[in-house]
């Protein structure tokens, strides 16, 4: 029995498998409506004011500007990995970041993906720019951020070790 599979079909199959694996990571950080954000993870959103702030974790630092009106929001941020992580892990396998809109009690109303466009298995830039804008859910008074990523070593002698980075400021 002879099997005739073209390289194009193999490439499509590998692309489908890779897409399935990466989609699993996106679902991991997807926040469900009704989840409660811990008080220290909440960022007040005041109509008409520009909020500049910093999200600082053990893995990264994100400086951001956030502006909200009654119906819309605008977000821009600069992300950099901290603590010498990039000395050991120089490739970015995946990285996803979301912003959730919260009501006055810290309950998630909805979330948006604010992940910057990054190439898989690319070197980690010193600064990662991200921007987003869109409709703001009615009743939202604050936002919260969460992220998930996998960094990899890029040395053949040590193998390809990985490190997960994540921040999930939600009650359990």
Image (cartoon, rainbow, N blue to C red):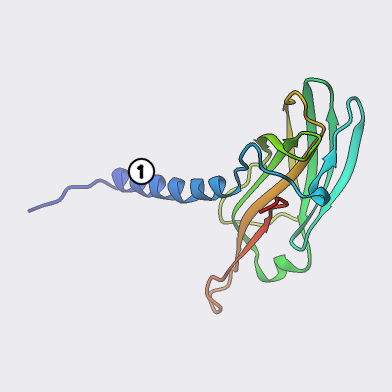
- The correct choice, above or below, for 157 with respect to 42 in the image is below
Q: What percent of the width, then of the height, locates residue 148?
A: 63, 53
Tag 1 secondary structure: helix
Residue in view at x 44 percent, y 47 percent: 20
- The correct choice, above or below, for 87 with respect to 123 in the image is below
* Left or right of residue 121, residue 103 in this image: right
> Are there few (<14), some (14-19), or many (20+) residues within 10 Å of tag 1?
few
Q: What percent of the width, then of the height, locates residue 64?
A: 83, 42
Residue in view at x 77 percent, y 55 percent: 80
Residue in view at x 84 percent, y 35 percent: 66
Residue positioned most to the bottom = 157
Figure quadrant of residue 36? top right
Q: What percent of the width, then of the height, locates residue 3?
A: 15, 51
> Split into 4 quadrants, where in the image is the C terminus?
bottom right
Figure quadrant of residue 57? bottom right
* Left or right of residue 18, residue 71 in this image: right
Q: How many marks?
A: 1
Q: What percent of the width, then of the height, locates residue 115?
A: 66, 42
Residue in view at x 67 percent, y 50 percent: 147
Residue positioned most to the right = 49
- For disc 1, the marked residue is 12
* Left or right of residue 45, residue 14 in this image: left
């Amino acid at each position: 029995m002879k099997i005739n599979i073209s390289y194009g079909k193999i490439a499509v199959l590998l692309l489908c498998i890779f897409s399935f694996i990466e989609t699993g990571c996106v679902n991991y950080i997807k926040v469900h409506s009704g989840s409660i954000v811990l008080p220290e993870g909440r960022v007040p959103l005041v109509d008409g004011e520009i909020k500049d702030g910093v999200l600082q974790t053990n893995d990264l630092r994100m400086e951001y500007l956030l502006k909200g009106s009654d119906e819309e929001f605008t977000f821009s941020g600069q992300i950099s990995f901290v603590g010498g992580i990039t000395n050991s892990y120089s490739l970015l396998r995946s990285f996803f970041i979301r912003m959730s809109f919260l009501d006055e009690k810290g309950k998630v109303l909805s979330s948006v993906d604010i992940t910057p466009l990054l190439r898989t298995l690319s070197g980690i830039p010193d600064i990662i720019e991200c921007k987003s804008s869109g409709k703001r859910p009615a009743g939202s008074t604050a936002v919260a951020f969460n992220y998930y990523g996998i960094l990899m070593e890029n040395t053949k002698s040590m193998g390809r070790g990985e490190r997960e980075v994540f921040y999930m400021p939600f009650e359990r």
